[in-house]
Image: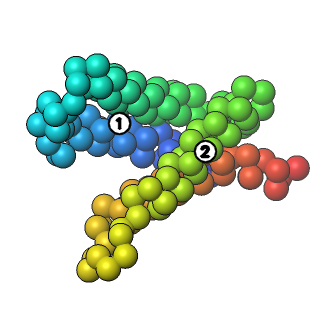
């Protein structure tokens, strides 16, 4: 039951990341920033972002629709859980290293902490069924 709840939790959080990413264009004023780039670079960045949004939607739908299969990992489910968890581990590390606050900055943006925490939670949510399975053997 914990394993299935973990996968569902991961699916819901990933769906929230999907929603969040659909808002980034407006939240950060990308329309103006992208207008300063060449047309090719505008299209590349926009395409990558749309692909990422679709990836998050796919992650969340797989998690929510196939939560039972993913919570009893075997075969392909093991690979999916490892891939999803590895993606979120990478994203948490990237958040800490790439988006770190420069030295001398008075405060750390709350969003930095929130996103790092969400990415760690997602990594744990997707690896937990495998950990629980290895403990129960």
Q: Nearer the viewer, residue 94 or 10?
A: 94
Q: Dot 2, how many residues are within 10 Å of its Cα: few (below 14), some (14-19), or many (20+)?
A: many
135 on left or right of 48: right
Residue positioned most to the right:
137
**Quarter occupied by residue 111:** bottom left
45 on left or right of 95: left
Q: Is mark 1 on a helix, strand or loop?
A: helix
Q: Relative to 30, is 1 above or below?
A: below
121 on left or right of 46: right
Q: Is mark 2 on a helix, strand or loop?
A: helix
Q: Nearer the viewer, residue 132 or 55?
A: 55
Q: Relative to 92, is 100 above or below?
A: below
Coordinates of residue 84 in the picture (x, y in percent) = 59, 39
Q: Mark 2 points at which residue?
A: 85
Coordinates of residue 56 in the picture (x, y in percent) = 43, 33
40 on left or right of 51: left
Q: Nearer the viewer, residue 55 or 94?
A: 94
Q: Mark 1 points at which residue?
A: 18
Residue 54 appears in the picture as rendered: no
Q: For marks 2 and 1, give the CA distance.
A: 16 Å
Coordinates of residue 73 in the picture (x, y in percent) = 73, 36
């Amino acid at each position: 039951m914990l394993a299935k709840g973990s996968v569902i939790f991961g699916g819901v959080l990933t769906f929230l990341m999907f929603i969040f990413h659909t808002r980034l264009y407006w939240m950060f004023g990308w329309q103006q920033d992208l207008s300063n780039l060449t047309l090719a670079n505008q299209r590349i960045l926009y395409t990558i972002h749309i692909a990422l949004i679709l990836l998050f939607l796919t992650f969340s739908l797989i998690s929510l629709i196939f939560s039972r299969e993913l919570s009893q990992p075997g075969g392909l489910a093991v690979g999916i859980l490892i891939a999803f968890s590895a993606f979120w581990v990478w994203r948490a590390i990237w958040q800490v290293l790439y988006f770190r606050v420069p030295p001398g900055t008075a405060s750390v943006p709350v969003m930095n902490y929130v996103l790092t925490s969400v990415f760690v939670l997602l990594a744990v949510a997707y690896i937990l069924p495998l950990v629980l399975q290895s403990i129960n053997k």
